[in-house]
Amino acid sequence: MSLSSIIKNIPKAELHLHIEGSLTPELMWRLAEKHSVSLPYANVEEIEAAYNFKDLQSFLDLYYAGAGVLRDEEDFFTLMWEYLARCAEENIVHTEIMFDPQTHTERGIGFDVFMPGFLRAIQKAEDEFGISSYLIMSFLRHLPESEAFETLDAAKPYYQYITAVGLDSSELGHPPSKFERVFKKAKSLGFKIVAHAGEEGPASYIWEAIDLLDVDRIDHGVRCQEDQALMAYLKEKQIPLTVCPLSNLKLCVIDDMKEHNIVQLLDAGLLVTVNSDDPTYFGGFLNENFEALHTSLNIDEKTIRMLAANSFKASFLPQEKKQVFI
Ligand code: HPA
Ligand code: ZN
């Protein structure tokens, strides 16, 4: 079997995916027409052409603007359904999906609009494809901690549908320590904890996420290599890193995929996974991330199988369900 067929056919879990970052230019265009939202683009091709980023912030500006077309429950259903249908094609059998409530509540769109849409699509994907999905509610770190507390409170009617709480958006200048109290509360409520750290930010932000937020996983984390004591700790505790290769390339965290350190991190004994982050903005869904690693870093079948097994090991699935795929 070719490596492309192995990548396509092996069962995988995806653990780092922002649902708002799976909005295709076609759906953005359709929803803009539906709601008479004016976009700064003349057609779908112009939307695609705008996806050239110099850093995280230049991406986030377009990503938040793009999410402005999501208005009613059906829009959120369609967004989630299109992603899960893609998972079925890619043989992603389990997914842990981040959503950014504040991107919507700031526009007057509440949990009562987006959650029913998300949950309906998740149920349909479970029924039709057998895909299991968990939700990760992420706080926007460029906003104050008080607003993260308000978001945690507003989510109360939906706690049973949310597995974990996360931290995303502009990393530099917004260290995990800014959110220590709200994550303590989230932990006490029984949520798993994840946080973006060490994407653009330094290794010290990864330490903060571990020491102050008590994370179960680090999102990205590729800058951990700058601190050997941190590398040793991540290895010893097997704290997973949800690495996103095409994202790192598109946001200029690396200049060339050949420079990506994922193989070095694996070789160092870290629990590393591959993920797509914001696939429609970064030029590839999960299998295309695996393909890029194969093309540029020459990863072999054994490594692909290890990365797929890691995706289940690092998931929040119960042990007996993980075991089937490890
Ligand atoms: N980093 C931080 N925040 C984000 C990202 C990311 O890669 N994608 C969506 N929100
Ligand atoms: Zn991310």
Image (cartoon, rainbow, N blue to C red):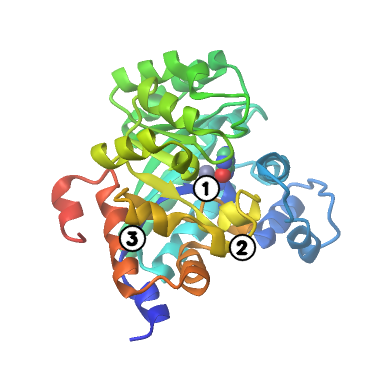
Residue designated by label 1? 19
Q: Are the residues flagged by discs 1 and 3 in contact, CB closer than 8 Å?
A: no
Q: Which residue is mark 2?
A: 283
Instruction: Label 3, secondary structure: give it.
Output: helix
Tell me whether circle 2 and circle 3 mark residues in contact (CB < 8 Å): no
Q: Using the image as rendered, state which of residue 98 and residue 250 is in the foreground.
A: 250
Q: Nearer the viewer, mark 2 or mark 1?
A: 2
User: Which numbered dot is residue 111?
Assistant: none
Q: Amino acid at mark 1?
A: Ile
Residue drawn 78% across and 56% down?
50
Residue 162 visible in the current orientation: no
Q: Amino acid at mark 2?
A: Gly
C-alpha distance separating marks 1 and 3: 22 Å
The picture quadrant where one finds residue 255 is bottom right
Q: Position of residue 282 (x, y in %)?
A: 61, 57
- Residue density around tag 3, few if under 14, some if 14–19, many if 20 or more, within 10 Å: many
Q: Residues within 10 Å of mark 1 (few under 14, many from 20)?
A: many
In the rendered structure, find residue 307 and report the number of the disc placed on it. 3
Seen at 59% across and 24% down, the residue is 174
In-image side of 169 versus 264 (left or right): right
Closer-to-camera residue (211/280): 211
Kind of residue at disc 3 = Leu
Q: What secondary structure is found at the residue carrying circle 2?
A: loop
